[in-house]
Image (cartoon, rainbow, N blue to C red):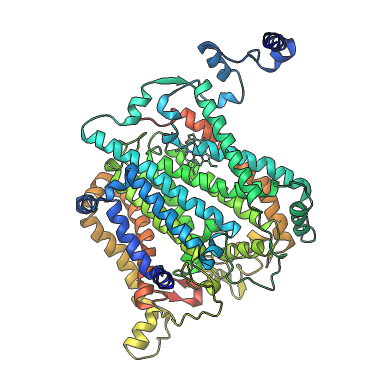
Amino acid sequence: MLDKLKKLLENIRQTQFVRSIFRMGGGFPRDVRQRMFVMLNNFFMHLHPVRIPKHAIKIKYTWCMGGLSFFIFLVLAVTGMLLMFYYRPTVEFAYGDVMDMNEQVPLGIMREIHRWGAHLMIITVWLHMFRVFMTGSYKPPREFNWVIGVILLLLTMLLSFTGYLLPWDQLAIWGISVGSNMAAASPFAGTEGPGASLLKIGSINFVHKGADARFVLIAGRFIGEAALVRFYVLHCVVLPFTIMIFMAVHFWRVRKDGGISKPL
Amino acid sequence: MEAIKNFINACAVPSRMFPVIVLLFFFVFPVNSFFEKYNKLFFLDRLWTKKGGIFLFSTLTMFLSIGMLDENFRHTVSKPDNLPIVGLIYASLFFLWVALSQARENDLRLEKNEKPKEWHDSQEKILVWPDLVSIELIAMLFALGFLFTWGILVDAPLEEPANLATSPNPAKAPWYFLALQEMLVYFDPALAGVIFPTLIVVGLMAIPYIDNNHKATGYYTFKERKLAITIFLFGWIILWLFMMVIGTILRGPNWNFYGPFEYWDPHKVEALTNINLSEYLYVIGLNMGLPGNIFIREAPGIFLISLYFIGGGFLLTKTVFKNLFKSLGPLRYSFFLVLLLFATSLPIKMTLRWLFNLKYIVSIPEFFFNI
Ligand code: HEM
């Protein structure tokens, strides 16, 4: 019986159709040669090298934190897209839509996974940075990948910040108020920032409540419909797109810089 | 029990807890031979052994679980959006231990002129399929399981619909920004909300270009990178995590301080009023009114700030950082010094606030400029 099943599977693998999908024929790689080819001939595996030094796969060394940050990002992308099916970014509907996700969807935990995943990603990114620092992995030739990393850190936190407003509840609007009020204190660019009152000709102020850093951030004098749309677009399109580009460069650099850092 | 709780509440006040923690920090992470001596004397280096790890873990767990018996503590810590911070406290302690226990092991090897542990491992090459991909698969399943469990057990919060007319007290940003919000207590929003965050990002990016000790790459060590690691850990543990925990757990209505076991009474009054340096000098010291001219009024503060950056910088260069200046060269060193002086200005300002109720050193509200 088992033999027959194995034979059947083998036959399926040998069909033109399966062989056209997996460039190597889709068999489970058994010897060294096949194991090397599977890494080279699969787009997703191609992110990895074929061979690596043994310390690089020790959990004690990398803590898996970079990889986990990426994986959680993917989980957030998938759950986020599911949420987008139900969520309308308007003052009229936003809160109710989120409420419905909590109460109407049977077994619905996508919102939970998305929210807790966001918290978790912040933690894993921080810990990843901590690991990279403690192993001295930012030193040449990896300096610039560290810089890209800091940008990724910033983007991760901005993604969380923009997402925080979307449920449109008290927690959201007041959490974001604290942040956007700080923007009003930007030097020169915020109405309540140092130097802003110097930027004027005669009695005409260039920086005022209708034209300052806070206004740019929340698209108005106070947090309302326009801010919601602005944060929605940033959260669902602009920032994820940007972070994906930086991640791609980050991974590419890890490999071009000689793989995971190792002692000389 | 009440007496113990009151005692802990009193100890947790930042002006008491912060100096103790900072002091402890330098003995736990000894930068030089002076601290190293005491580090050994008090067995603090043993924290990074297995037993030390168990000790750290059980102390934290004991404190948290006894704390959970208290209603007020339970209330703040178990808010759904605050749970991650409890996880973060555990995770950062655990990984601190993971890093430093390996550093300790390697340092012992290096002392004997042996290669670090990672060097031996890295001599052998392995295939990514199946050795790495299987680990990745397990890690992914584990993370997914963890998220699902968390999602099933704890509902995502949804409060009343947004309403700009009724503000909650306190209005808090999400926990990962609370170190910044906590800084607002001591600094003007322009500094705490814009300039310091910018400097944090710039400072982080500058690390690889400032640290020119290119030796210790690819393995955990403390002894070979004492200064770099101590500075980084000071920023990470004290200026970021510690401030964040205070901001999340110990700040209640009106951003007043509340001990871990204290009821968040919205009517608690903080009697203290903070005073600017100019008022200290002209009104209290010289018994006269504040000068009308802004520059005369603020000259003492501006002088102090310049003294801090120029005089302090000069002094540090001539004394503790003499060798560092030589090895970094003028350009790297200047960047390092400016960033460091900005970072240390936070604990200094905090101390000045606690000792003298000092509000701002330079205060020009006319231009929204306060330091
Ligand atoms: C969205 C956030 C991030 C993702 C998804 C990510 C992902 C990764 C991955 C998968 C690796 C391979 C090794 C490992 O897993 O440790 C890596 C390495 C690295 N990361 Fe990140 N990272 C992120 C953020 C950061 C941050 C915040 C920093 C530092 C500020 C950073 C700096 C580096 C450096 C320097 C390496 C090379 C390490 C080595 O060679 O040992 N990354 N990153």
Locate the C terminus of chain B and report the quarter of the image it occupies. bottom left
Choose top left, top right, bottom left or bottom right for residue A53: top left
Q: Nearest the camera: B360 or B96?
A: B96
Q: Residue at x 51, y 62 (%)?
A: B248
Q: Nearest the camera: B326 or B145?
A: B145
A221 sits left or right of B292 in the view? right
Q: Residue at x 69, y 73 (%)?
A: B165
Q: Residue at x 63, y 65 (%)?
A: A174
Q: Position of residue A168 (x, y in %)?
A: 71, 60
Above or below A123: residue B79: below
A231 sits left or right of B214 in the view? right
Above or below B92: residue B132: above
Asked whether residue B332 is in view, the answer is no
Locate the N terminus of chain B and report the quarter of the image it occupies. bottom left
Asked whether residue B245 is in view, the answer is yes
Q: Position of residue B275 (x, y in %)?
A: 41, 80
Number of marks present in the image shown: 0
Q: Nearest the camera: B295 or B106?
A: B106
Above or below B300: residue B101: above
Name the residue at the front extreme. B1
Q: Position of residue A163 (x, y in %)?
A: 65, 53
Q: Position of residue B253 (x, y in %)?
A: 55, 73
B129 sits left or right of B294 in the view? right
